[in-house]
Amino acid sequence: MAKRKISNTLALAVLGLLQERPMHPYEMASTLRERHKDSSFKINSGSLYDTVEALVRHGWIEPVETARDGRRPERTVYAATQLGQDEFVRWIDELLRMPVAEYPKFMAAVSYLGALGPDRAAEALAERAGHLAERIDETNRVLADTVGSGQVPRLFMIEVECVLHAWEAELAWTRRTIDEIRDGSLFWPEAERTEQGWTWSAPSDGRGSNR
């Protein structure tokens, strides 16, 4: 598969917005936030303008007019080109078909969970579980106010649904792991350095206990 000229997924969001109508970057950012797309895309003004410039450079979008609103500075309005529309569809198709390694930071931390010791690990995971529960509740309220009220078709916010299910799965795993740490069913081996290298204690009953 040929390397894509633009791989930043914020470009995907820009191309998606321009399927609706031409927009200037400020309107793009506002619309993405209003639609709660900041759960799917990292949105800030600097990166958005850089992305727009890259899309113009590669011929995926083009300026179509310069608009002024009152005393505000002039803003350039952009529209997708035919090339940009073709790339947009190809890119979505590719991302849906092929899972890719994304290296989330949480997985990196979990891989070294043992470094904290059982008590601190359980405490850290419990704090994370609280944040996840709050995020899930807030997202459910957003979906109820938008999709649930009929203001927005479900298809237009289906990625929020997908993210919500991922958070719920993570919360279930986190709570289960906390319970296993606290009841001792997740064995915490003690490491010892010997002349032959590192060794780890084995659970005494096949499973062991941290207590």
Image: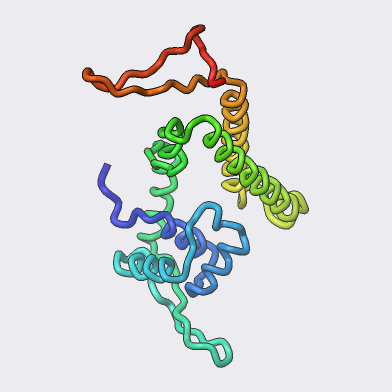
Residue placed furthest toward the top: 205
* Residue 199 in which image quadrant: top left
Q: Total number of numbered labels?
A: 0
Which quadrant holds residue 49?
Answer: bottom left
- Residues 132 and 72: in front is 132
The x, y position of residue 53, in whole percent, is: 35, 70
| Residue 195 coordinates in the image, percent (x, y) | 22, 19
Q: Using the image, determine if residue 128 lies above or below residue 22.
A: above
Q: Point out the image quarter for the N terminus.
A: top left
Taking 103 as reference, is 127 left or right?
A: right
How far from the left and from the top, in percent, is residue 34?
A: 62, 64
Color style of the picture: rainbow
Residue toward you, 126 or 44: 126
Tell me if residue 166 can be seen. no
- Viewer can see residue 8: yes
**Residue nearest the viewer, comparing 36 with 92:** 36
Assign the C terminus to one quadrant of the image: top right
Residue name at image x 42 percent, y 43 percent: 95
> In which quadrant of the rendered view does residue 130 lie?
top right
Residue at the extreme right: 149
Residue at left offset 53%, top offset 88%: 72
Specify the farthest residue to the left: 195
Residue 3 as seen in the image, left or right of residue 141? left
Q: Residue at x 58, y 23 (%)?
A: 180
Compared to 156, does 106 lie above or below? Answer: above
Residue 107 at x, y percent in the picture: 44, 37
